[in-house]
Amino acid sequence: MRVIEIFHSLQGEGILSGTPSVFVRLAGCPLRCRWCDTKYAWDFSAGDEYGVDDLVEAVSKHPCDHVVITGGEPMVGPDLAAREGLAELTRRLRAGRMHVTIETAGRLFIADLACDLMSISPKMANSVPSEPALAVAHERQRTDPGALAGLIEGYPCQLKFVVEAADDIDEIHRLLDRLPPVPSNRVLLMPQAGTRDELLARAPAVAQLCRETGYRFGHRLHVLLWSDRRGV
Ligand SMILES: C[S@@+](CC[C@H](N)C(=O)[O-])C[C@H]1O[C@@H](n2cnc3c(N)ncnc32)[C@H](O)[C@@H]1O
Ligand SMILES: Nc1nc2[nH]cc(C(=O)O)c2c(=O)[nH]1
Ligand code: SF4
Ligand SMILES: [Mg+2]
């Protein structure tokens, strides 16, 4: 598997925000969201090659029982071998008594992952890249209610929607209407913010939207603490 970085930090997002966690960032993402804060992980051939044994050993060096597998898009992977590698990695981490979170846009359903929290961030219209060729690929890739439904029914999950403007909520409601029910405290609205200044500017409107809708506020604790620093 190709790995961009492994680091020990606090989970910055979602219902486990604040939890000390080791992050494994896998290489490659076909979606190329306009505001992605991790563009350095888009290339499938970037980073270093690791076997599952090496990865488990690198993770277990940290004094920590939560692991977050992210990317890039860890659920896509360049080929079948990479997806089987992901399944094997989750099983080995779970066997070592680690709590496993997978961060994914939710474009692909994969069964049999040893995943304690499927952290899904479905991509909405505000994420479409401005370059037309990329936008076409993104439209094709970004939402598949069938895959999302499979993940929601197959795993403990949370849905993290990236919100830029108050009217994003209409599209979120339309998508939720087509999915199996998710409790409102597992639906999070997260400000679109790659820097601390953007977070402070957008958070109040998102907080207000949470009060109006009953959905949960999605933190970006790492952005608050370290702004756009890489590897934290
Ligand atoms: C870099 S992505 C990697 C995992 C997967 N590709 C995904 O999108 O869920 C990790 C998380 O960061 C979020 N994210 C990326 N850029 C962001 C930004 N500018 N503002 C808010 N959230 C962002 C994504 O929506 C996702 O929840
Ligand atoms: N601290 C911290 N928390 C995170 N939660 C999800 C992240 C990600 O990039 O997937 C992330 C990240 O990059 N850093
Ligand atoms: S799906 Fe995730 S990694 Fe891929 S471009 Fe969008 S935010 Fe970035
Ligand atoms: Mg991140």
Image (tube, rainbow, N blue to C red):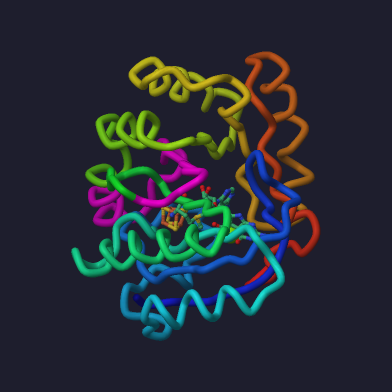
Task: Locate residue 95 relative to residue 109 in the image: left or right.
Answer: right
The residue at the far left in this view is 80
Q: Toward the viewer: 148 or 116? A: 116
Where is 172 relative to 201, above or below? above
Quarter of the image holding residue 163?
A: top right
Across and down, in percent, residue 200 comes to 79, 45
Is residue 162 inside the magenta stretch?
Answer: no
Quarter placement of the C terminus: bottom right
Residue stretch rendered in magenta on the structure: 113-138
Residue name at image x 36 percent, y 81 percent: 51
Which quadrant does ligand 2 occupy?
bottom right
Determine whether, in the image, residue 104 is placed left or right of residue 38.
Answer: left
Task: List x then y, in percent, for residue 97.
Answer: 56, 58
Q: Position of residue 46 (x, y in %)?
A: 38, 80
Above or below, comparing residue 112 to residue 225 in the picture: above
In the rendered image, the residue lying farthest to the bottom is 48
Q: Which quarter of the image is occupied by the N terminus?
A: bottom left
**Label tally:** 0
The residue sitting at 74% across, 22% down in the picture is 208
Q: Is residue 1 left or right of residue 24?
A: left
Task: Estimate the x, y position of residue 219 in percent, counting from the top left.
Answer: 70, 43
Q: Depth check: 5 or 150 in front?
A: 150
Residue shown at 30%/59% (left/top)? 30
Q: Quadrant of residue 164?
A: top right
